[in-house]
Image (cartoon, rainbow, N blue to C red):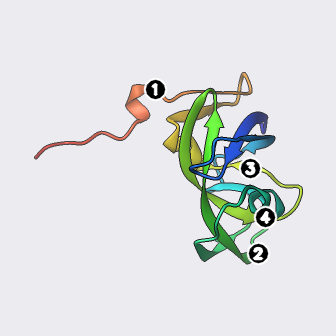
Amino acid sequence: MPFSVAVGVANHGDAGFWETEAVVDAGAAHAFLPASFLEALGVARTRTRAFKLADGTRKNYDLGEACFRIEGREMNSPVVFGDEGVALLGATTLEVFDLIADTTNLRLIDAPEGLLVRIFRG
């Protein structure tokens, strides 16, 4: 079941965060915010990539990097310059923050230790 969380977003290196609500969507690869929102923050477009949307269509979107504040933590993460009216937190951003979606209680929680990447020495 989808749910929304409060998210602060800033151009990395800037101190001022703009607050927004974003739907947690672990099926999406990256955070997806309206292009006009990211442009107003001064986030730079760094590349263009094709994405397959939920309805099966393909569309090219620009990507950049922004600083996110989620659950009191601040980290940089890739972000897609998306369509107006759509704000999503995708799997990459959740992984950067070591968070997972608790769909029973409709909240983000710390990823259990077993789900974090482990480095094995051979």
**Residue type for callout 2:** Thr
**Residue type for callout 4:** Ala
Which residue is identified by label 4? Answer: 35
Q: Are marks 4 and 1 in contact (CB under 8 Å)?
A: no
N-terminal label among 2 and 1:
2
Q: Position of residue 4 (x, y in %)?
A: 79, 36
Is residue 21 toward the left or the right of residue 85 in the image? left
Which residue is identified by label 3? Answer: 88
Measure the C-alpha gap from mark 2 to mark 4. 19 Å
Q: Are marks 2 and 3 in contact (CB under 8 Å)?
A: no
Q: Nearer the viewer, mark 2 or mark 3?
A: 3
Q: Please, is residue 103 above or below residue 105 in the view?
A: below
Q: Position of residue 69 (x, y in %)?
A: 64, 36
Q: Residues within 10 Å of mark 2 (few under 14, many from 20)?
A: few
Q: Which mark is residue 112?
A: 1
Q: Residues within 10 Å of mark 3 (few under 14, many from 20)?
A: many
User: Who's the residue at 53% across and 42% down the image?
Assistant: 75
Is residue 3 toward the left or the right of residue 72 in the image? right
**Under tag 2, what secondary structure?**
loop
Q: Nearer the viewer, mark 2 or mark 4?
A: 4
User: Who's the residue at 83% across and 62% down the image?
Assistant: 36
Which residue is identified by label 2? Answer: 57
Q: Which mark is residue 58?
A: none
N-terminal label among 2 and 4:
4
Measure the C-alpha gap from mark 3 to mark 4. 13 Å
Measure the C-alpha gap from mark 2 to mark 1. 34 Å
